[in-house]
Amino acid sequence: MRCDFADSLLHSYFDTELSSVDTAEFGRHVQKCSDCGSELVHLDLLRERLQLAQIYDPAPPSLCRKINAQIRPKAQTTLRSQPLLWHWLAAATALLFVAIVLWRMSPGLRNDDYQAELAAEIVDAHLRSLQPGDVTGMASNDERAVKGWFDSKIKFALPVHDFANQGFALKGGRLELLEGRSVAALVYERNGRLINVFVWPTQGPDKSARTGSQRGFQWVDWRQDKMEFCAVSDTDPADLEQLRQLIYSNT
Amino acid sequence: MRFEQLVLPHVDAAFNLARWLLRRREDAEDVAQEALLRAYRFIRGFHGGDARAWVLQIVRNTCYTWLEKNRPRELSVEFNEELHQQSDATPESLAIAGDERERLTRALETLPPRYREVLVLRELEGCSYKEIAAITSIPIGTVMSSLSRARRQLFVVLDGSPGSEEANREM
């Protein structure tokens, strides 16, 4: 018979993740429980083995070189020997820089690229969520519970609604990383298929729905009330549109 | 520059995580590079806090997306019996393997990615449960139970014990 604590508490104790009160209490338990005592010895040995074996694999120099090469202007290597060329390159780089700034400042010009990149990120995130164990950080069909879970983690008021009566059952929510920022993901199920609705705050004005598809997945993206929504799934596009309208009219 | 201060100090951590998730250094170098360039593009999205966790979260996401496209089977199996056999990492063969570093490496590689990543983040990267939860987007309770199972499974692969019966039954 293994001790009941040998799985859960023991590992938190070993990893010094318990509060000081719990640590003291569990320390007393370990003194009496030979099961936990010997397990702790095993865990210690394992940690020591992993550290002594030096299996940490630091980045090869070639990786750092590649990163540096991609984030720095390529001109630098030829600079010293050819000062004239260097001046030309500097001028060209400055021009290019101005061009990039202008391009970045005009959203209309880069909207399509941005949208395609965002859609790719969203489909990636959706695919990841279909992996076992990943779909919800908070699994519940209770609107209040899901909203409460999000409220402690995000800084905007996320509308959470269960549309089970309309055929879109709320499954829960989780946090996702899109373009480097944390966004909320609401998970719905429609006829056995999962729909992720990603939501994040935006400064932009309201925007009507835009749809698209990537790698067999449909998405619909819109903005309302300083929030951007993007729903993605492999369901029928009509289903996504129906869910969009439900969210739209309940937000 | 922001990227140099925030991201470049974590290039080793980024590569190490990718290397253990993908099991091949060549793939890890490509995918870590892709992830770091993503971090470069998205640096404006980083609003302070733990830069290492932010970088590793991007690395982890990029690795899973890559695995999905290139080796989806590795993700679909919860306990990787097949991989376990493929890599010949039975306790017997590992005992013959002799070299401790090699032995531990092969043992870790037989674990499913989800167990491997929590072990690597905890034991090699020294992350707290909270950091691991942020990087992997799984709740802290699940981090704890995954670690406990991952360690038990590693014991089994390395030594055939302890608690092996229980660990096998649960899988």
Image (tube, rainbow, N blue to C red):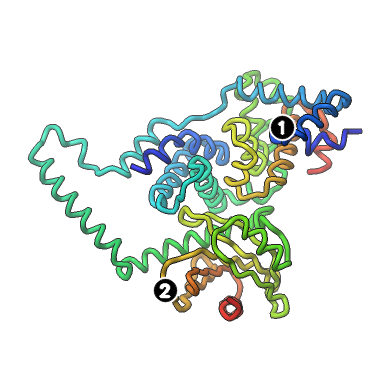
Tell me: A28 left or right of A14: right
What residue is disc 2 on?
A: A205
Q: Determine whether the residue tagged by mark 1 lies in a helix, strand or loop.
A: helix
Q: Determine whether the residue tagged by mark 2 lies in a helix, strand or loop.
A: loop
Question: Residue at (67%, 49%) from the top-left corner?
Answer: B139
**Front one among B49 and A174:** B49
At label 1, counting other C-alpha atoms closer than 10 Å, the crowd grade (few under 14, some 14-19, many 20 or more) is: many
Q: Chain of mark 2?
A: A
Please state which of the two labelled residues, at mark 2 or mark 1, is closer to the viewer: 2
Rendered position, B110 above or below A50 = below
Residues at marks 2 and 1 touching, judged by CB atoms closer than 8 Å:
no
Tell me: B116 left or right of A207: right
Do the residues marked 2 and 1 share a common chain? Answer: no
Tell me: A58 left or right of B147: left
**Farthest residue toward the right?**
A1
Q: Chain of mark 1?
A: B
**Farthest residue toward the front?**
A21
Q: Quadrant of the C terminus of chain A?
A: bottom right
Question: Residue at (40%, 52%) from the top-left corner?
Answer: B44
At label 2, counting other C-alpha atoms closer than 10 Å, the crowd grade (few under 14, some 14-19, many 20 or more) is: few
What residue is disc 1 on?
A: B154
Residue B20 - label: none
What amino acid does circle 2 point to?
Answer: Pro
**Front one among B2 and B168:** B2
What amino acid does circle 1 point to?
Answer: Leu
Tell me, yes or no, if residue A147 can be seen here.
Answer: yes
